[in-house]
Image (cartoon, rainbow, N blue to C red):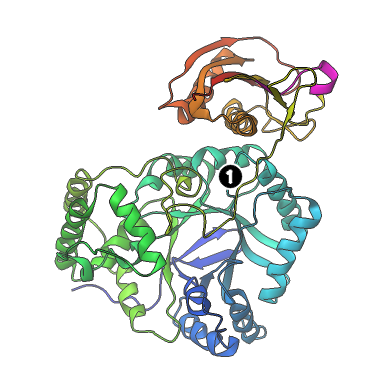
Amino acid sequence: MIAMQAHPERTLLAPGLEISRLVCGLWQVADIEKDGTIIDPEQGADALEAYARAGFDTFDMADHYGSAEIITGHLLKRFAAVGPRPRAFTKWCPEPGPMTRDIVRRGVEERLQRLGVDRIDLLQFHWWTFEHPAWLDALHEMQAMKQEGLIGALGLTNVDAAHLALALADGIEIASNQVSFSLVDRRAAGALSDLCATSGVKLLAYGTLCGGFLSEKWLGQPEPASIADWSRSKYKRFIDTAGGWEPYQAILRAASEIARKHGVSLSNVASRWVLEHEAVAATIIGARLGESEHRDDNLNVFRFALDAEDHALLDAAFAETKPIPGDCGDEYRKPPFLTASGDLSHHLDAIPSVYQAEPVPGRPGRLRVSSGSIWEPIAGYSRAVRIGNRVLVSGTTATHGTDRCVAPGDAGAQATYILDKIAASLNPLGAKMEDVVRTRIYLKDAEKWEPVSRAHGRVFGTVLPANTLIEAGNLIGDYEVEIEVEAIVEG
């Protein structure tokens, strides 16, 4: 007999920001409106109000979820004079490019206007490529808006542990990171959770039910030949990458056995497994506008706990799968692109290079790249030069823009930034990090070798170029590390 639970558990995500541990995701709005039909905002607000009254009073949306922000704005108006209002999280997902003060403020102010609020409870930021360093400009401007009271808390979405650590080391106050986390995609239980334990950042987990694949409906069923809807197409790619249909079925069988033992649904087990991770503040469930029968079932996740026997069953099933490669968010930034289309074509037209190659006067066939650092014209050098099929990248420091040192004192964070900058320098010259054959690392303090080496390993762990690492003594300014590389482009 399981104890009854009237409302979802609650947690404190940030000072003054108490939320439901089951957050209602509003991506369904975009699906409903994809043919041009717009949901009446008052009718949509009626559906959301039913959730809020039942204790599911925290809603998550994004700038591209159709009219979800507008619908939520209509909901919030109803609570203006009647006590605590529901919590509204939204995301800003701009295309890569310069993030000037005006661009950032326009993006945030549009969220404020659509929600009809003076302050956004949690604004989450997504960035498509870390090779474009303007993501830090955007975060610093949003931090300023947070200090002005226009943003309650800042969050990230689809950011890996290394870049979350970089943002924190660069002085950004991050409350949360929204990432994929499920019985199939367990990446968030690794380095990201370790960082959360030391930083206090919390995870908001989406994809916990893999678009419905983690339910009794699919237990023992044959593999579908085709999938019509975008959400399931995306999560089928995760299943394929994790080893395919049979290892996935092994997870379903284990979760089903645990569900029968506790008198709950298979989906409850999938959600409970994620919620029991200390780093996880909440899971995000799809809000079904006009439907309510699943709310009681969702509450079952708070009516039981997984024991050692349950974890042993799941661990045995996990052992039959392959880990999803990389870290959280990599599915949007590098192959294999685990999106509905298998690439970014339904998100972006293209990802622009942050730097441009230019011919070297008087040297036919030779190209060079400048990063805009004040030191390049003063000292007379290029960030990178291509001669034939050989690309040489100068010693690179964590210099942002013309002269700002990123993450002063943090060698690992600086190395992460530097390696992004090197990748951006190679790109316009027709080279990739996979083409790198030699790296040289210069440290101010040899005792900081490990975080720098780990950053190097995250990028070059399968490339395995020749490497030299030495203590160089004092580097100019607040720089802890400098890295140079050589690449050879085949063909």
Q: Secondary structure at mark 1?
A: loop
Residue 271 visible in the current orientation = yes
Q: Nearer the viewer, residue 367 or 58?
A: 367
The percent position of residue 191, horizontal first and vertical second, equals 43, 39
Q: Horizontally, is 318 left or right of 235 in the view?
A: left
Magenta stretch: give its range.
375-386
**Residue 15: percent from left, percent from top:** 61, 58
Q: Is residue 301 left or right of residue 475?
A: left
- Residue 59 versus residue 461 in the image, above or below: below
Whether residue 382 is in magenta: the answer is: yes
**Does residue 117 appear in the picture of this structure?**
no
Most foreground residue, 407 or 368: 368
Q: Look at the image and tell me in which quarter the N terminus lies.
A: bottom left
| Crowd rating for badge 1 (residues with CA inside 10 Å; few <14, some 14–19, many 20+) | many
Assess whether residue 466 is covered by the magenta stretch: no
Type of amino acid at the residue the image marks with label 1: Thr
Query: Residue drawn at (56%, 80%), measured in percent from left and top?
Result: 36
Q: Which residue is mark 1?
A: 129
373 up-or-down from 67: above or below: above
Marker count (numbered): 1
Against 39, is 116 above or below?
above
Residue 206 in the figure: left or right of residue 2: right
Reply above or below: 440 against 264: above
Query: Residue at the location (52% across, 22% down)?
Result: 436
